[in-house]
Amino acid sequence: MAQKQEYLSKNQKIVLDIIEKSAQPMKAYSILFNVQKKGLKAPPQVYRALDKLVEIGKIHKIESRNAFIACRNSACTIANATAFSICESCEDVKEISSSKLSKYLSNFQDKEGMKYNKYNLEFFGLCKKCK
Amino acid sequence: MAQKQEYLSKNQKIVLDIIEKSAQPMKAYSILFNVQKKGLKAPPQVYRALDKLVEIGKIHKIESRNAFIACRNSACTIANATAFSICESCEDVKEISSSKLSKYLSNFQDKEGMKYNKYNLEFFGLCKKCK
DNA sequence: AATTTTATTGTTATATTATTACATAGTTAC
DNA sequence: GTAACTATGTAATAATATAACAATAAAATT
Ligand SMILES: [Zn+2]
Ligand SMILES: [Zn+2]
Ligand SMILES: [Zn+2]
Ligand SMILES: [Zn+2]
């Protein structure tokens, strides 16, 4: 599936840049604080960029944390099949790229035979360090 | 695995009752509005009850919607392995109870061989009616 | 029964997350 | 060049969630 957008707008670049520099998910208002020196002063500027970046798959939202992380899964050019592991102690988050898992979930059918075009999976546990 | 709590407190009962009566997920402030006639006037009263009900598995939080739904999966006495299907058009939400799926996910190991004690999976698509 | 402890509730205020609405500016299509 | 569309700026506000502390009630201990 092809990328939906060729280029990023100025604000989108600024927001993506700050997220990519972070090893961990960033919260919207933390992003806002960090990009104020670049001229983005108000929440809508950040949220608009976030929305678009999520839509085109450059970043993902960690729903249980209301935070955003850069996609580093090269197989994941699409924004609609995501899986993460989350450490409940240190809040470390990693994107899981398992073709087996993604195949399994993409093909999953419920009792009525319904298939889904999109999913988000969040695993919770303790990372190596915290165990 | 046994239930963690024998009985529910007054507020927990009131909140659970209103959620169980709803076919669809309810938002915290909608719950608050609905229980004001029963004397629960402030957000913390609702959120405390919600926290406990989630913890003991009576309800689940639909993270992508910030909403709460009653558990109707009899196999799901635990709160740590949940899966839902969500219609992106009418917002209909159903809990998925597939022992195959839950076994697959409970046994999933990432590249480093790590297993997780908890997960939440949300599928998105169009329900029968909306298709 | 009185005391201590624990769990629950009530209340106010505030923090955090996200959107609406509308004005302005830049870009693309014709 | 004008229209249509896209992106941006800005102020205000909506929606979601928690902190802090006081008051009650229930359970356990003496
Ligand atoms: Zn990705
Ligand atoms: Zn950790
Ligand atoms: Zn359940
Ligand atoms: Zn539907």
Image: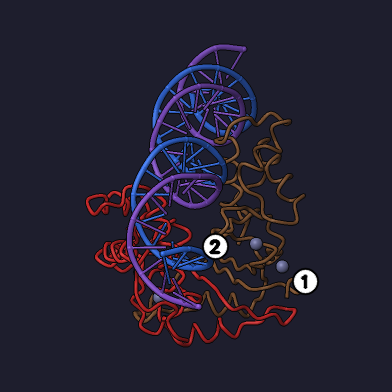
Chain colours: A red, B brown, C purple, D blue
- Check the image and report above or below for B117 versus C24: below
Discs 1, 2: same chain: yes
Label 2 crowding class (10 Å Cα cut-off): few <14, some 14-19, many 20+?
some
Q: CA distance from mark 1 to mark 2?
A: 30 Å
Circle 1: residue type: Lys
Q: Is residue B61 visible?
A: yes
- For label 1, the residue is B129
Nearest the eye: B25 or B87? B87
Mark 1 residue's CB less than 8 Å from ligand 4 = yes
At 70% from the left and 49% from the top, the residue drawn is: B19
Disc 1 is placed on an element classified as loop
Task: For mark 2, name the chain.
Answer: B
Circle 2: residue type: Asn
At 59% from the left and 74% from the top, the residue drawn is: B102
First in sequence: mark 1 or mark 2?
2
The image shows residue C3 at horizontal and vertical percentages of 49, 16
The image shows residue B49 at horizontal and vertical percentages of 60, 41
- For label 2, the residue is B80
The image quadrant where one finds ligand 1 is: bottom left
Q: Is residue A92 visible?
A: no
At 65% from the left and 76% from the top, the residue drawn is: B99
On the image, which quarter does residue B29 sit in? top right
Nearest the eye: B17 or A103? A103
Label 1 crowding class (10 Å Cα cut-off): few <14, some 14-19, many 20+?
few
Disc 2 is placed on an element classified as loop
Q: Specify whether D26 is left or right of B107.
A: right
On the image, which quarter does residue B92 sit in? bottom right
Nearest the eye: B92 or B40? B92
Mark 2 residue's CB less than 8 Å from ligand 3 = no
